[in-house]
Amino acid sequence: MTLSPDTIGMIIALFAFTATVLSGVGAMLAHQTRGLDARFVQMDARIDDRFEQVDARFEQVDARFEQVDARFEQVYRRFDQVDARLDRVDARIDRVEERLLGVEHELVDVKITIARLEGPPRRLQQL
């Protein structure tokens, strides 16, 4: 089978055209890929910056929580001291109540003794 020179020229031209189109498409894809890579790098940098900002904020919040925790510990210690003082006050009040009850009983005894000394209530004398 013999091919005419025109057919061979057409086949070579078709291969050359296909190679040219494919190289153009490849160049276009390479250009798009470079642009996307650059955008991804920019986005990564922005995301890294945001994460660093968020980490810094979390560190500040952690420091504030530690300060609040220290304050709560101080308050709890104060509450413990106040509770101890209230327990002592309760014990003193109990002792005072016991003494008052004792004084009340003694006062009743004194009243009874005075009543016995005065004698029975005087009755009206009949005329």
Image (cartoon, rainbow, N blue to C red):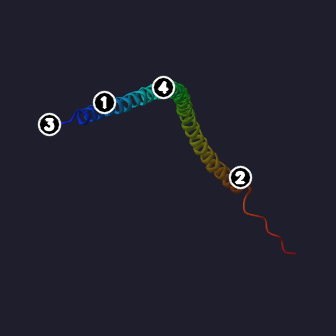
**Nearer to us in this view, 28 or 107:** 28
Which tag is nearer the camera, tag 4 or tag 1? 1
Q: Which mark is residue 16?
A: 1
Q: How far apart are marks 2 and 4 (CA)?
A: 105 Å
Q: Mark 4 points at which residue?
A: 42
Question: Do the residues bearing badges 2 and 4 touch, measured as CB atoms within 8 Å?
Answer: no
Question: Whole-percent x and y of residue 117?
Answer: 71, 54
Report the label total: 4
| Residue 28 as seen in the image, left or right of residue 73 | left
Q: Distance between the residues labelled 3 and 4?
A: 59 Å
Q: Earlier in the sequence, mark 3 or mark 1?
A: 3
Q: Name the residue under label 3.
A: 2
Circle 4 SS class: helix
Q: How far apart are marks 2 and 3 (CA)?
A: 158 Å
Which tag is nearer the camera, tag 3 or tag 1? 3
Q: Distance between the residues labelled 4 and 1?
A: 39 Å
Q: Which of marks 2 and 4 is nearer the N terminus?
A: 4
* Residue at horizontal 53 percent and vertical 29 percent from the top: 61
